[in-house]
Image: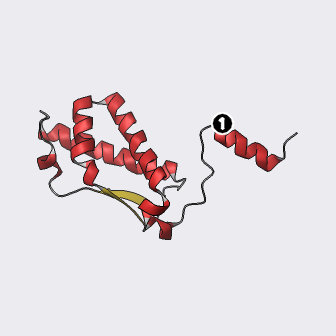
Amino acid sequence: MPARGIDRFFSARLAGVDMADEFDPEKFEDKYVHYFQELQRAYKNAFNHMNERHDSELIHGIDQMVLNESEPFYEDGTFHVELPENPRDRLQGVLVDDETFEETLAEYVERIEEELHRTLRVDRPE
């Protein structure tokens, strides 16, 4: 019978959970070195979630023309995504009204932030 620590490791691996080190806010300052895979996973999970619920052309446009220039940050116990200037002007070739764009982008950013918390196992402050 395997030891409990090994058993937990394999159970977590089978469940698709990485046994990454505990999140370190200081390392997140150099996030593309220390947390690149987790960032990719969080953005991909958010994309998949949004693509299932919204017009795929709009979601792909936001992903490729707006979020490709976004920057995630961690401050005061929470993640937030900073968008590039004039995100609406960046969306080219997708016919959508401004209100739908703004609402969808806000939901998408919120989903990315949720996924960052979940992927990096950081509880949101209350």
Counting other residues with Cα less than 10 Å from the Cα at mark 1, is it few (<14), some (14-19), or many (20 or more)?
few
Between 71 and 109, which is closer to the camera in this rendering? 71
User: Image point 12% across, 41% down: which residue?
Assistant: 92
Residue lying furthest bottom in this view? 26
Residue, disc 1: 14
- In the displayed structure image, the side of residue 43 where residue 118 appears, left or right: right
Percent position (x, y) of residue 66? 23, 48
- In the displayed structure image, the side of residue 87 where residue 108 appears, left or right: right
Secondary structure beneath dot 1 equals helix
Residue lying furthest front in this view? 33
Percent position (x, y) of residue 6? 77, 47
User: Image point 26% across, 54% down: which residue?
Assistant: 69
Whether residue 76 is visible here, answered yes or no, is: no
- In the displayed structure image, the side of residue 12 where residue 123 appears, left or right: left
Percent position (x, y) of residue 74? 42, 63
Task: Give the amino acid at mark 1.
Answer: Leu
User: Image point 39% across, 35% down: which residue?
Assistant: 48
Query: Please, which colouring scheme is shown?
Result: secondary structure
Whether residue 26 is visible here, answered yes or no, is: yes
The part of the image, by quadrant, that contains residue 8 is top right
Residue lying furthest right in this view? 1
Percent position (x, y) of residue 125? 48, 59
User: Image point 66% across, 42% down: which residue?
Assistant: 12
**Which quarter of the rendered picture does the N terminus lie within?**
top right
Instruction: State how many labels appear.
Output: 1
